[in-house]
Amino acid sequence: MKRRERLMATLRGENVDRPPLSFYEINGLDENPADENPFNVYSHPSWRPLIDLAREHTDRIVIRHVPYKSAAPDPMEKVSSTESVISEGRRITTRRINAGGRTLTGRTRRDPDVNTTWTVEHLLKDVDDLRAFLDLPSRAPGSEVVTDPVIRTESALGETGIVMINTPDPLNLAASLFNMADYTVIAMTEKALFHQLLERLASYLLPKTEAVAKALPGRLWRICGPEYASPPYLPPALFREYVCRYVTPMIKSIHEYGGYARIHSHGNLKAILDDIAAMGADGLDPIEPPPQGDVELGYVRERYGKDMVLFGNLEVSDIENLSTDQFAEKVKRALREGTAGAGRGFVLMPSACPYGRILSPLALRNYETMVEIVDV
């Protein structure tokens, strides 16, 4: 089977010649070794063999965000400012919002040798900051969305893969405004206030999901954020309040136009699997094995695999640290458990990818091992 054909058949629950293999963020399309930007870790020669491997031998799932073509003016622009500076080689970005007689400040840091952005100061620090933020005018949804990036990416991929539309849920946007300690306390003790925040964010996200699903029907989606309400951060009852209430209508919009909704949730899953299934999710990732998670892939396959495509269940830390013989056994076990019995489908995939500038020879060899085992 061709790679795109294999992925789409898996999403539909049809038989395939072998389980698809994805390297998650590494897809051989978005990484540019020739880009000399100091923050592009993929310019290091150690990455080139992995980029080529992903391009030539994986079932490519390329993540894309879809913006509005013509959005209403953002009222935040009148009361906020953003500045970026390079300090000691790092890019520091500071956002300030004037709200309720106070200045809300958030700050991020990007290091040249680490492919991630760290939040070093969160915008909201306490309940009073949250109240001030809620008093600001809300952003209205736009109308038409920009489909060109998705269409161009699909054209570039041809038969080698598919696009996955990426969206946060309201909880993702809400929780990321706070540091984790403040978020969990406020979410537990100020439920009415926290729902106001979620409703505000949902009023923008839900119409956008509808607009994108209508303009780009039949695609795979990834919905990020549910993990913020998984144990041990919050109890399952609040997962239903903060996730199910808002994500279920997103999934319904995606389904209305023939799309497939994949829930992205790291960490513990066992206590919330019934709720994820009840929302009508078509897929789940990354299904991390213990000790990173609290449930084995075989358990999820047996109980929920009939209705959901399972994506996982390899840890990036194992790719970087396990001997190749040990890692090969992890791959074989994931394939065995992910395809056991009747089920909608399984995609072998790591939980993330290495984010340092230099890819180790061991990590590269373990990626190669994934391809060798799946292709047998």
Image (cartoon, rainbow, N blue to C red):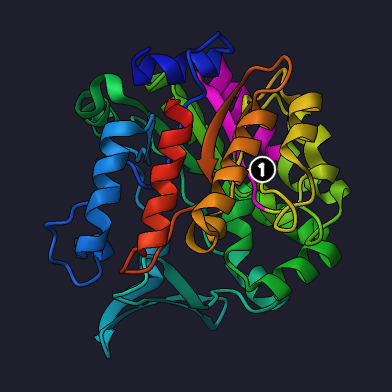
Locate residue 366, reporting x and y percent: 44, 50
Locate the C terminus and report the quarter of the image it occupies: top left
The residue that appears at 54% across and 51% down in the rendered structure is: 325
Q: Residues within 10 Å of mark 1 (few under 14, many from 20)?
A: many
The residue that appears at 34% across and 77% down in the rendered structure is: 111
Give the vertical position of 295 relative to 341 (above or below).
Answer: below
Q: Is residue 18 magenta?
A: no
Residue 267 relative to residue 163: left or right: right
Give the vertical position of 195 relative to 21 (above or below).
Answer: below
Locate residue 163, reporting x and y percent: 37, 30
Give the vertical position of 72 relative to 39 (above or below).
Answer: above
The residue that appears at 29% across and 75% down in the rendered structure is: 112
Write down the quadrant of residue 300 in the picture: top right
- Which residue is at the far bottom? 88
Query: Helix, strand or loop at disc 1?
Result: loop
Residue placed most toward the observer, 106 or 24: 24
Q: Amino acid at mark 1?
A: Ile
Residue 43 relative to residue 253: left or right: left
Locate residue 48, reporting x and y percent: 22, 53
Residue placed most toward the observer, 295 or 109: 295
Q: Is residue 249 magenta?
A: yes
- Can residue 30 be seen in the rendering of this structure? no
Locate the N terminus and report the quarter of the image it occupies: top left
Magenta range is 245-266
Q: Pointer 1: what residue?
A: 287
Residue placed most toward the observer, 291 or 238: 291
- Which residue is at the far top? 14
Locate residue 34, reporting x and y percent: 11, 57
- Which residue is at the far front? 325
Residue 134 relative to residue 144: left or right: right
The residue that appears at 71% across and 23% down in the rendered structure is: 305
Residue 307 relative to residue 164: left or right: right
